[in-house]
Image (cartoon, helix red, strand yellow):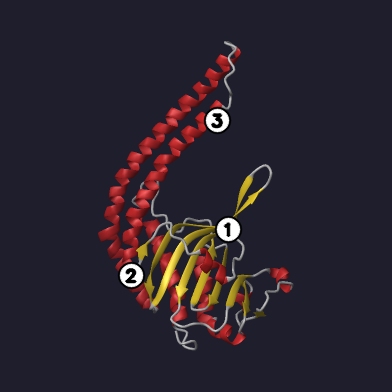
Amino acid sequence: MQEDAYATLRDNFENYFKATISPLLKNDEKLRKTYLSRFWLFVLLAAFAIPVCIIGIYVANHLFEKNINEGLVFFVAAFFAYLIYSPYKAFKKKVQNNVMQPFARFFEGFSYRPEKPLPKEHILKSKIFTSFQNVAAKDCFSGTYSGFDVQICEQSLTNVRQSSKKTRQITVFQGIIIALELNKKLSAQTLVLKNSGLFGLFQHLDGFLKIKLDNAAFNSVFDVYTTSENEARHLLTPLFLESLLDLKQALKGKSLQASFFENNVLIFVETKLDMFEPYRFFSSNINKAKINAAFERFLAIFQAIDAVKTNRKLGF
């Protein structure tokens, strides 16, 4: 897709936003005010009930020589914390579905699939992350673009560590995973990893060869490992390298890594930001900026896919 085609897509989305999404945001604004009222009501109740509970326990224990467990205060506080959070959680879930479904439909052939992550087995095959136990997803989109099947998931990979005293959850990855199914099977596997600096001098991956590309800006950010140097150089064209750098910036990524294997491309963009959150809770929900940000992130992903599509050497 050329720049003029992206400009046309932006214009079309502007019209779509006015006709389809804006009315939904206005309806959700009424809902937001209802849930926000509940939120502040629970805050006021907590501000009254918790001090009363503390004073009551103190008086009972010291004046009437009762033996009421002071842990009751923490139970009451936890109860009100749940109550206070519940309006926000309910509003978030409802608005996310209300807005993201029609947002996804703008991109012909795409649908919104919340909480349906990419399978663990598929991620393991990428060899980017090889040690994690749990997979969880928040927002997922799937569809077809430029003849490729595409999945875009806001996803986390975690491990659980247990000790004699407590159980900890360790985050291995949190961010966006972009899965692209090619129409041609690759003969080798190529990994684009975040640059490991001086440690990279000693890093070795069994069966993989580390190569340098003719792009200084790319080499300063990424390390490339492959089982076929010839195929890797055909895959990682200057246009595609540039699109990866742009994608990392557009998604505000702390890091970006990618794997090309079989007939798949998996791109991992590490970020703690909520990429597809179309709402506000404490201020007006009629906010075009958040929707436009989500649109521009989709566009950056499509530009990276277009860079793959134009790779004539591999016949995509």
Which quadrant of the figure has residue 98? bottom left
Residue 109: give its label: 2
From this view, report whether residue 182 is shown above or below residue 297.
below
The residue tagged 1 is 133
Q: Where is residue 223 in the image (x, y as percent from the top left)?
A: 63, 74
The residue tagged 3 is 74
Q: Earlier in the sequence, mark 1 or mark 2?
A: 2
- Element on which disc 1 rests: loop
- Element on which disc 2 rests: loop
Is the residue marked by circle 3 packed among few (<14), some (14-19), or many (20+) residues within 10 Å? Answer: few
Which quadrant of the figure has residue 152? bottom left
Q: Which residue is drawn at 64% across and 51% down?
A: 161
- Label 2 sits on what residue type? Gly
Q: Residue at x 62, y 62 (%)?
A: 131
Q: Is residue 268 visible to us here?
A: no
Q: Which of marks 2 and 3 is nearer the N terminus?
A: 3
